Amino acid sequence: MNARPAMPQNDYSALVPPELGAWSPTLSVSVVIPAHGGPHLDLTLAALAAQTYPGHLMEVLVVDDGSEPPIRLPELRPDNIRIVRPETGWGISNAVNTGVKAADGEIIQRLDADMVACREHIEAMARWHHVTDYLVTIGMKKFVETPPLTPGEVYRARHLGEVFDLAHAPGSSTEATIAKTDGLRKSRNPYHVCTGPTIALPREIFHAVGGLDPGVTRGGDTEFAYRLAMHGVVFVPELEAQAVHLGLPAQHRDRERAVRAVEPHLAQRIPLRRDLRKDRGRHWLVPYVEIVLDIADTPESVVRQAVSAALDGKLQDVVVTLVAPWSLLRDGRRSVLEDPWFDLRVLREVFAHDERIRLIDEASPTPAPTPFRYRGPVDVPLHRATLERMIETVQKDLTGVLIVDLPDGRTARLERTSALARAELLADLGDDLDDIIETTHGVRHVPPDRYWPKPAPPQAPAVTAPAPEPFAATAPADTGERTLLGRLKSALRPN
């Protein structure tokens, strides 16, 4: 499969998946189920045993996350199933990573141990991945109270509605968002609905973004989905992939504590959540903008001015990357004053100990997970309003690259990471990435005036009336007029 159409934004309308039951799958699927105790795991596995996806192409990995007693597999289960256990760590994210590491499938299907999937669930999710290989598919779910039910009844049911009261089952907020955004085609941030319990994606992409973060104890699925977005994927909701979640989620039981547990993790790692970054003067784990300046052979004073301007803008949520041949600076014996790398060594000492500044030899293809990257001439310092206004411009229509045409013929540019990453996925050797971004997200050229506004002309000093002299001297001496005090003195003076 080499088909990689250049889809605009998150509009996957050009893709036509095969009809359920009328095609022959070829890709292998690994269903990864993290489980701690797993009181309903027997129902989950019974539903997987009844899947329409070919059994020889599907494996199930149950990741026993420290269950006491250890999980034992029930009799009614898929043919190709095994239990794996983490060697270190704990939690859902760590368990999922363990399962994927042990998986053989080309597609990873994430499923929770308290979910029961419809018969077509795996097939419906996997069919999209046979069309192209940079998608993340999202299944649907409803929340139900667990009825008295046996694995055999789940296995024999043709539809979920035969064994669950779906008419009164509340859906997740995911489905409402999907409906409101034309199936996520018009969503500005489709990763928001990719919350984990049933998603499928290529195993290569799972590893490319680094898997789930075990340090995120709540909200790990959302943080992982954000990194997927920064990798350039397209999110596809699959309405035919229905499932039920047995019991209400944690946020229904204690919403206030659930929100408080999630927000710090997302604030540190998802810069697009501007609503969570309201504390002034803070530095965050993942910055909002990376400012890349190529400083090779640039005078120290010019570099210092550029860095100061970058860090002193209205938008403070930034990191500055200085590109130069830093790796050539050896630390062995040398003549300090006659060192051919004298200037670069001085700059290294100036900036190396500031956590907001990075010294690298070559900029990475994308700044992921940072959502924006600025690149411009080092001798054109940023105005205090430059970054704020550039981002305001691209966020209006989700433009992929904003190019400011400077008066001397050079350019400065703001790149959207998700657009840049999408172009990297689609490009062949020698392709111009901007040509691809023009198709997927758009490239806009603008004049510099709004982004480097000219300073206001100095105002002439206001003309002020001269201050009056003291009261006794206000009357001109030659007018013959006297002040009240003067007249009083004259009247009292002896003749």
Image (cartoon, rainbow, N blue to C red):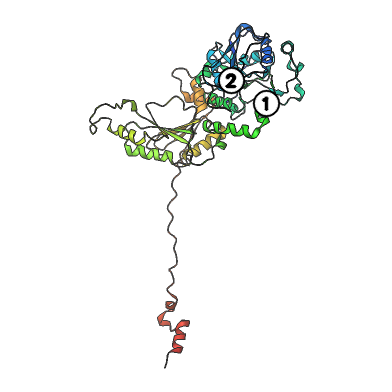
Q: Quadrant of the N terminus?
A: top right
Specify whether residue 238 is in view: yes
Q: Position of residue 467 (x, y in %)?
A: 43, 69
Image disc number at residue 102: none
Q: What residue did someone put label 2 on?
A: 136
- Closer to the chain start, of discs 1 and 2, is 2
Number of numbered markers: 2
Residue drawn 48% across and 21% down? 424
**10 Å neighbourhood of mark 2: few (<14), some, or many (≥20)?**
many
The numbered disc on residue 175 is 1
Q: Is residue 254 left or right of residue 414?
A: right
Left-right relation of 106 to 332:
right
Q: Position of residue 370 (x, y in %)?
A: 49, 30
Spot the residue most to the bottom.
495
Q: Position of residue 83 (x, y in %)?
A: 59, 12
Q: Position of residue 157 (x, y in %)?
A: 74, 12
The residue nearer to you, when weighing 394 against 369, is 369
Please, is residue 322 above or below residue 88 in the view? below
Q: Amino acid at mark 2?
A: Val
- Rendered-image quadrant of the C terminus: bottom left
Which residue is depicted at the point 56% across and 19% down?
Answer: 95
Q: Secondary structure at mark 2?
A: strand
Which image quadrant for residue 72? Answer: top right
Q: 10 Å neighbourhood of mark 1: few (<14), some, or many (≥20)?
A: some
Seen from the viewer's position, the closer of residues 467 and 406 is 467
Determine which quarter of the picture holds residue 266. Answer: top right
Report, in whole angstroms, how far the alpha carbon at label 1 lies from the one at label 2: 16 Å
Residue at the (35%, 37%) spot, across then down: 303
